[in-house]
Amino acid sequence: MEIEKPITIIGCGPGATEYLTEAGRMAARKADCRIGSKKLLRLFADCGGEQVEIGAGVDLAINEIGKRYGKGKVAVLVSGDPGVCSLAKPIIKKFGIENCHVIPGISSVQLAFARLGVEWYDARIISAHNSDPEIAFLELAKEKKIAVLAGREGAIAWIARLAEEIGTGYDIYVCEELSTANEKITKVAPKELDGYKASTMAVALFIGRELGK
């Protein structure tokens, strides 16, 4: 499949090659330049073309894309799915959807729910990746399924406070390093989250007990 637009945003899944779609793999290999994290660029270490390593900074990503815009096919590698708390949104806002081709991937949220055998279409997805969410705990108590993306130490502390407020009717799972050799899914009680040390690659699921999990 050819990259017909100057920028292709590729969801690379949680980071294991078996969760990268064939469409994403082909597009990344055909790009003149790949931009992404060290971990994701490593998936294409054997390919030709330029490899540009960036961290989580949005401004840096936009700047590096801008330097190469119109000079070849640029593939931006994002973890998980571009539609779930991703760099895709600011990139599309800057360059326009008419110039961006988005290839979906498998998110950690999808994989976490799949591991538990629970459908996720009606789940409330919240990001605590960069900062504590500005949302009332009582509002979340109305939800039957909650997924919290946790990419920093403070996120677990926020999740612990959430569990303390609404956790009595939920089973809580901390899903870490999904799709890697270090994958771990731990069912925890609300009080066990206080001081819990989780990977920076983690998602916490709150599943209403009436759902049977």
Image (spheres, rainbow, N blue to C red):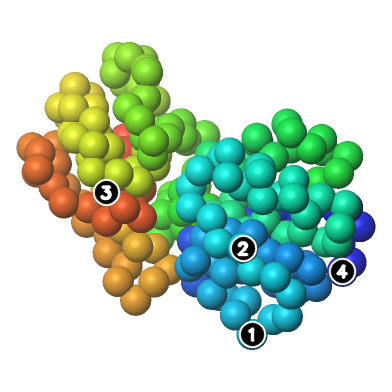
Whichever of labels 3 and 1 marks the residue nearer the N terminus, that label is 1
Q: Residue beneath label 4, please? A: 1
Task: Report the residue marked by disc 2.
Answer: 52
Mark 1 is on which residue type?
Answer: Asp
Tag 2 and tag 3, C-beta contact below 8 Å: no
Q: Which residue has dot 1 on it?
A: 46
Mark found first going from the N terminus, 2 or 1 = 1
Q: Say whether disc 2 or disc 4 marks the residue closer to the N-terminus.
A: 4
Q: Whole-Å distance between the Cαs marked 2 and 3? A: 35 Å
Is mark 4 in CB contact (under 8 Å) with mark 3?
no
| Quadrant the N terminus occupies | bottom right
Identity of the amino acid at label 4?
Answer: Met
- Which is more toward the observer, 15 or 41? 41
Q: Callout 3, which amino acid?
A: Tyr
Q: Residue at x 86, y 44 (%)?
A: 99
Residue at the bottom extreme? 46
Identify which amino acid the numbered label 2 is placed on.
Val
Counting from the top left corner in percent of width and height, residue 86 is at 57, 43
Rendered view: 39 above or below 116:
below
At mark 3, the secondary structure is strand
Q: CA distance from mark 3 to mark 1?
A: 37 Å
- Residue 177 visible? The answer is yes
Q: Earlier in the sequence, mark 4 or mark 3?
A: 4
Tell me: residue 99, above or below residue 37: above
Give the x, y percent position of residue 196: 13, 47
Q: In the image shown, does 127 or 57 lie closer to the viewer?
A: 57
